[in-house]
Image: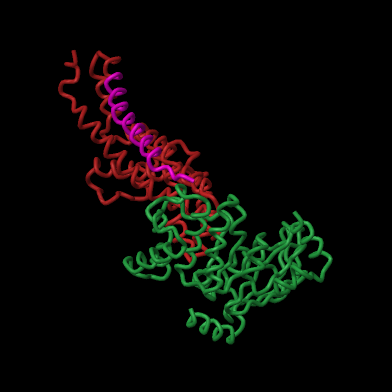
Chain colours: A green, B red
Amino acid sequence: MTEVSAAKEDAVATGELVVLRSVNKHFGALHVLQDIDLTIARGEVVVVIGPSGSGKSTLCRTINRLETIDTGSIAIDGKPLPQEGKELARLRADVGMVFQSFNLFAHKTVLENVMLGQIKVRKADKKKAEEKARALLDRVGVTTQADKYPAQLSGGQQQRVAIARALAMDPKVMLFDEPTSALDPEMINEVLEVMQQLARDGMTMIVVTHEMGFARSAANRVVFMADGRIVEEAAPDQFFSNPRSDRAKDFLSKILHH
Amino acid sequence: MFDFLEGYDVLGAFWMTVKLTALSAVGSLIWGTLLAAMRVSPVPLMRGFGTTYVNIVRNIPLTVIIVFTSLGLADIFGVTMGAADNFDVQGFRLAVLGFIAYTAAFVCEAIRSGINTVPLGQAEAARAIGLNFAQTLRLIVLPQAFRSVIGPLANVLIALTKNTTVAAAIGVAEAATLMKTMIENEAQTLAIGAVFAFGFLVLTLPTGLLLGWLAKRLAVKR
């Protein structure tokens, strides 16, 4: 553990991992991302919150170019996002992504899901890939489900497998696009615990979520978005106890007093 | 009762039907899959080619295509399929070529409808772990698409089996060619028709049942 945190501090010292500069995007007439500037440091956990339709999921998806942007620039580890093609595929392998609807490969077993990218993208040999896959499944607590198909698992288990699948690529940064929004309430915690562990291990994470508890406990920084803009950025304590913008005050008053 | 069958190689004729069907099925599955891949590819030129091909070929009567392979490809353009002096082999190969060209259009459309049943998230997840377009299609999308269209593909295969009778138009010695000869030579027209109808049922019914069973077994659970 000490080694990990030491490594984390080293990494943080080397600075910026994900940099967005005046990013703009339209969906038809809707200006869904407006002049977004955001820098995420190595080892940092950034939670993006905001009302639905504020552009937070789109923001998350632009970072591995599942959504293209109209203007501005996005760079990961100093390299600007390339055009569609080999370079982009290579970059995506370094950016782990966890989706709201899990998106495990439905025709492959849990184990195969976690092995596929290692073998086809990282060109690992089968035995090593299986070893690593089993270790990761153990880490997210679904070892016993390895030979089942995704449809046989609960939502929480599927999402933990999806996290293992992303981790199998040894990503530099992990994107979480509302990872718990499609889960039954009693399964949310098992996924959040895995994410919290990841954050403690020093993974750089960008998390779009409605889980304020997670934001408080695991985030280094909270980014509040509304209507396609970043309205406020602050440390979680400061943001939740003393939001500066009216928009954030309004949002928090609606979600926190129930 | 069945003495009108004497002197005719009915089994041999049906064996020719089976060979035509099997080779054409394999060929059209491959060509049809490639066409479907073109139709969903990000390259506009490929999409255009796939769409044009399917819309032209599936709207031309099969008889025209088969007759063209013989009178057009072979006689005018000299495409003899490596059998210039063996008319039987040449006719067989030309017929297979025609059936592949025609059936592939239907295979393509069946597979494309299968691709549409695969949720977008599957392809997104594949791209997100760094698979390229070809890998995403080959490893994630097509395997799921195939499983959801085994039923429609069975229909195409059954249609193909029966369509092979069109090869009679260019003199391939398959079942329909023999039936025509027998009807000309024998008196029992109705019985001959029944024998050949039964022969086709024997070929197509098990195909449908087997593929129906496979479709259920291989269905992707979501």
At 79% across and 65% down in the image, what residue appears? A248
Left or right: where A8 falls relative to B4: right
Where's the C terminus of chain A, which quadrant? bottom right
Left or right: where B68 falls relative to B172: right
Left or right: where A239 falls relative to B25: right
Where are the magenta residues, as a range?
B193-222
Q: Position of residue B150 (x, y in %)?
A: 41, 40
At 66% across and 66% down in the image, what residue appears? A59
Above/below status of A55 relative to B189 = below
Q: Position of residue A83 (x, y in %)?
A: 57, 71
Above/below status of A138 relative to A173 = above
Magenta-span inclusion, residue A53: no
Looking at the picture, tell me which residue is in the foreground, A194 or A38.
Answer: A194
Q: Position of residue A45 (x, y in %)?
A: 61, 73
At 47% across and 53% down in the image, what residue appears? B141
Q: Position of residue A93 (x, y in %)?
A: 49, 69
At 44% across and 45% down in the image, what residue appears? B220
Looking at the picture, tell me which residue is in the foreground, B38 or A12.
Answer: A12
Q: Examine the image and state in which quarter residue B201 appears.
A: top left
Looking at the picture, tell me which residue is in the foreground, B34 or A164.
Answer: A164
Q: Examine the image and state in which quarter residue B191 appears.
A: top left
What is the count of numbered marks? 0
- Residue A102 makes an appearance in the image: yes
Q: Examine the image and state in which quarter residue A118 appears.
A: bottom left
Looking at the picture, tell me which residue is in the foreground, A204 or B21.
Answer: A204
- Residue B169 makes an appearance in the image: no
Q: Main secondary structure of the magenta part?
A: helix
Which residue is most to the right?
A246
